[in-house]
Image (cartoon, coloured by chain):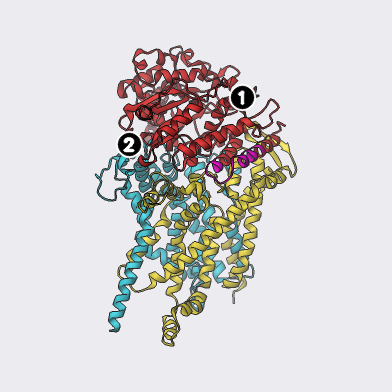
Amino acid sequence: MATQHSRSAARLMMAPAVILLLGWMLVPLTMTVYFSFKKYLPLRGGDLGWVGFDNYVRFVTSSAFWPSVMTTLIIVGGVLAITVILGIGLAILLNQPMWGQGMVRILVIAPFFVMPTVSALVWKNMFMDPNYGLLAHLWEFFGATPVEWLSQASLTSIVIIVSWQWLPFATLILLTAIQSLDSEQLEAAEMDGAPASKRFAFITLPHLGRAITVVILIQTIFLLSIFAEIFVTTGGAFGTKTLTYLIFQRVLESQNVGLGSAGGVYAIILANIVAIFLMRIVGKNLDA
Amino acid sequence: MARNVTNQRKIINTTAAWAVGLLIFFPILWTILTSFKTEAQAIADPPIFLGFDWTIENYKAVLERSNYGRFLWNSIIIAGGSTILGIIIAVPAAWSMAFVPSKRTKDILLWMLSTKMLPAVGVLYPIYLLCIRFGILDSKIALVFILMLINLPIIVWMLYTYFKEIPGEILEAARMDGASLKDEVLYVLTPMAIPGIASTMLLNVILAWNEAFWTLNLTAAKAAPLTAFIASYSSPEGLFYAKLSAASTMAIAPILILGWFSQKQLVSGLTFGAVK
Amino acid sequence: MFLKNSLYAATALSLFTAGGAAADTITIATVNNGDMIRMQGYTDDFTAKTGHEVEWVTLEENVLRQRVTTDISTKGGAFDIMTIGMYETPIWGANDWLVPLNDLSAEYDVDDILPAMADGLSHDGTLYAAPFYGESSMIMYRKDLMEKAGMEMPKAPTWEFIKEAAAGMTDRDNDINGICLRGKAGWGEGGAFITAMSNSFGARWFDEDWNAQFDTEAWANTLNFYKDMMDESGPAGYAANGFNENLSLFQQGKCGMWIDATVAASFVTNADDSTVADKVGFALAPDTGLGKRSNWLWAWALAIPAGTQNEAAAKEFIEWATSKDYIELVAAKEGWANVPPGARTSLYENPEYQKVPFAQMTLDSILSADPKNSTVEPSPYVGIQFAAIPEFAGIATEVSQEFSAAYAGQQTVEEALAKAQEITNEAMEAAGYR
């Protein structure tokens, strides 16, 4: 259908975005790879020469490496599970006839507008603090010993905070998908005596497949690089050091740019593994 | 009888939905409430919900200490600028991907998304050095540009999925009538795409407003937006919950209000092709 | 034509006036501590005296460190003055990253700076940063609770006494914890505290060949003692408490004792913020009889990055902010208890200041700290709660994260120490020490 003319025009229109992103990817990437083969210590005078693969070996053999990969996957997986499951529930609930639907929707999407730094600060100080936090008061009210959230249930706490931020996004996308569901189909099934659980499993859930894929895809991209939530709440202590945080520690706290850059290259590899994995699902589900 | 049942169900739905909605909103509400308390009341045990002496002292203190207006202005320019620039670049790209797809379109899209997965902190030094080289450290231009690049993949993706929903027949009809490519984009597509573009812009403004790594690390005094403003209240000496709440409220209020007023637009376009 | 000419004239005129007044705008990066925020409030006084404008970049401590370190090591030039501490100054000075402060005016009276502070902010005898305020650490305790427990605080107690007193003062039903100490990860938070404490237990970070010493009994004793005492008498969640968390706990009357920075004395005795203002006593930081006490030495100081365009104006600012006049200005407006402490000898000779209840104890604590000779056994590094080498901040942050995990019960003290040993040796090897 498309003529040769429109094809070349299309390429021309795509060019700025592609070239810019290519530059944005290649320039830092080249520099990261370059630094990763260097002994580069800003506090010791900067560039101290080539070291081959030393930084790469050192980064993976450090005792912090594998735990940080695990932590990353746990946080990403945990938040995805919570936001998708609760998101589906909320989307179904919000799709029911009710009074003040618009207002409820406003309440539900609000966390999405809050800066990650602010939400981490609010949760840490005003909710999870074991002495002054609201959750501590709540626990005390029921006669329980307050939980020391950020030190004793640190990963759970971070998953809670991040899920709170991303639940609105998941809910919104899933809600739009549910609204597009043919209600006649559901009513017909109801007439036929199909119980709610069956109707959900055989009609609603398959219909949501695509939306769930989108939620997982977009959120994974953002979740792999979460940083502020950890920096503000635990500073990487109590087993909350993600790969991103470990790189931060190498580059900024230890001021070892070479080592951190090698970590950056590993993070890129991890991201690409996840991306390929996602592409597989997306490819199947998003045949546009 | 049937009517009765629906009403009953509606009441249950409403109650449940409002309960969940308020629960989700509660942390924000609590922050806003706390911002009107004194520091002592902010940590009172048991906590006080409404029966405190409302005060605007915290806001006064924050305004006295920080040049809020400048932080706000920088946030607006950076978020707005990067969004506009991003849209200008993304619309043609998404348009061509949606209407003149090739075999590699999907690969390009996914590749674009994968550039978002680079850990920012890994490239802080290279980018910092580049900014020094070009003399754009602590400038809004640098941030407008960088945030545009960070969010460009999302914008392209979102616009692409939106454009794809526009039926191709309309274009063909326009072409039959002898419309040029320019006319096609300007008079046929754009009007249909406006809701999608609006929604994309909103999402991008939110993302840019809340970006806290580059905005903090590439600025000093001149270009610092609200993320830097918050960093000066996060843990000072002594009691600070009330002042922190006031500063937090001031940092999120503009975007919260914008989001609420435009939530219909945001929702209508925020599908990422999830609905077919 | 006329318009063009007059425009030129106007431009020339405005250039001239600007040049005539030599007014510059300087950008200052600082930490959001109380004394610095107070200083911001007095900026107008500086502008009135010199004509220079000041742009403040006020950041939380962790963000500030990250920000200024990036900028100085890349020679970014984003700031004309940076607020840094005793750890950074000698390292950066040695790299020639800072402007030497060896030509300050006579009326500034550089010799009035407390020698301990001037030493810590110098490299090879050259001063590279001027102390805005200095601190050591000491015990702050509740006199009423001490009395209630039937004990009396000596002027220089031992750790054994502190542990006993903490247990005696603890009253869980009334939400009173015998002792509040830092446990938060971070080299400048819990890391600083435990390192200073370990000195009094005979521990050190490195032996003379830069081998990590966490496999020694002295370190095990330090950590076990700390954890036992805090589990028994400390507040909930102490593993995440830093200076600020403990300050609010103490101000709210939830701590019997608190061993921390001497600057906190003015916050806990300030009746506006503290519910226990009139009940606080002070004592020297504890020891174990091995000859070293567990108090540290620190200063927040102002330094000028080399290469700044506004060096002259920046120097004027430093002379203003760390001068005797500034202290007088704050004293006149807010009382002597609120002046920045620990920087100048003359302050402690001032009879007005001697009336402040914590003045003498602060001075005694500062004078008893010796960064060049901080450990019982010999060590190759300078510094009390840190070792003044570039690698320390990174290593100590990771080590203190392991310690905090042990405090929170996620691992045993032995595991934490074993990991600390590994982390430290690994990093020292990477840096080429071993």
**Residue C10 image point, x, y percent:** 37, 31
- At x 42%, y 25%, the residue is C19
| C-alpha distance separating marks 2 and 1 | 39 Å
Chain to which mark 2 belongs: B
- What shade has chain B been given? cyan
Q: Nearer the viewer, residue C310 or C353?
A: C353
Residue wearing tag 2: B64
Label drawn at residue C365: none
Q: Residues within 10 Å of mark 1 (few under 14, many from 20)?
A: some
Residue C117 location, x and y as percent?
51, 20
Residue projecting furthest to the bottom: A192
What is the drawing colour of chain C?
A: red
Does residue B217 appear in the picture of this structure? yes
Q: Amino acid at mark 1?
A: Ala
Give the labeled residue for mark 1: C94
User: Are the residues at dot 2 and dot 1 in contact (C-beta closer than 8 Å)?
Assistant: no
- Farthest residue, direction right: A52
Q: Within the image, what quadrant is residue C402 found in? A: top right
Q: Is residue C417 magenta?
A: yes
Q: Quadrant of residue B267?
A: bottom left
Image side of residue A103 versus residue A119, left or right: left
A154 versus C134 height, above or below: below
What's the magenta bit mostly, secondary-structure-wise? Answer: helix
The yellow-coloured chain is labelled A
- Which amino acid type is shown beneath numbered disc 2? Glu
